[in-house]
Amino acid sequence: MKIRVMETPLYVTEMKALGAQPTPVAWPETYTALQTGVVDGHENVIPSILSAKIYEVQKNVTLDGHNYGVDWFVMNNKFLSNLPPDLQKVVEVAAQDSCNEERRINRVFTEEGVKALKDKGVAVYTPTPAEIAQFRVATQKPVIDWLKTKVDPAWIDGIQAAVKVAEAKK
């Protein structure tokens, strides 16, 4: 199965681990690539599928949650450090609040988008926990091995340890 991916080694590694043929295609060309069979599928967020009218050429969506979009707040550290402590706190709280609100809005857009896709005749499937576990088994090692070639392996090990602690608290 040919899956449209961004031309990013991480996404290519992930799709290869799943047995797919990763096919880099620019986002503006995705609709035509799906329509003409250049690719069989793609990965993207629900609001993007709706806004690009991908549902016209793709009638199945799987909500597997395999990627998480991280929200970044970036500020010049010298500028932030030169603010009085009370204003530093205001900036930090505002940044956290805005990221939380953005996550909430994304959840709402996704929920509403899934309903809209279903209304347009798209079949929406959510994998079972067992199926998600199979995805993890297939992709985790290759992706982590690739990441360890790009950043300090100790950093990746620390993240994995933190994930285990967080999962144990569920």
Image: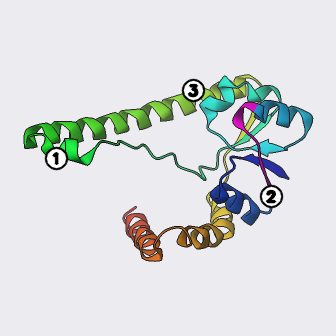
Residue for badge 1? 81
Place of residue 73 in the rendered image (x, y in percent of width and height, measured from the top left): 35, 42
Q: Is residue 111 above or below residue 7?
A: above
Q: Amino acid at mark 2?
A: Ala
Name the kind of residue labelled 1 in the image. Ser
Using the image as rendered, state which of residue 81 and residue 156 is in the foreground. 81
Q: Amino acid at mark 3?
A: Glu
What percent of the width, then of the height, locates residue 141?
A: 62, 73
Q: Secondary structure at mark 1?
A: helix
Which stretch did the figure color magenta?
Answer: 22-28
Q: Position of residue 120 (x, y in %)?
A: 75, 23
Q: Give the alpha-carbon distance from disc 3 to disc 1, as whole Å.
A: 41 Å
Residue at horizontal 69%, vertical 68%? Answer: 138
- Residue at point 90%, 39% (across, down): 37
Q: Nearer the viewer, mark 2 or mark 1?
A: 1
> What label does residue 112 carry, if any?
3
The colour scheme of the drawn protein is rainbow
Residues 3 and 168: in front is 3
Residue 158 image-quadrant placement = bottom left
Quadrant into which the C terminus falls: bottom left
Up the image or down, 136 lies above or below 59; here it is below
- Marks 2/3: CA–CA distance: 29 Å
Measured in 3D between alpha carbons, the distance from the residue under mark 2 to the one under mark 1, in whole angstroms, is: 47 Å
For residue 35, which quarter of the picture?
top right
Q: Is residue 70 left or right of residue 144?
A: left
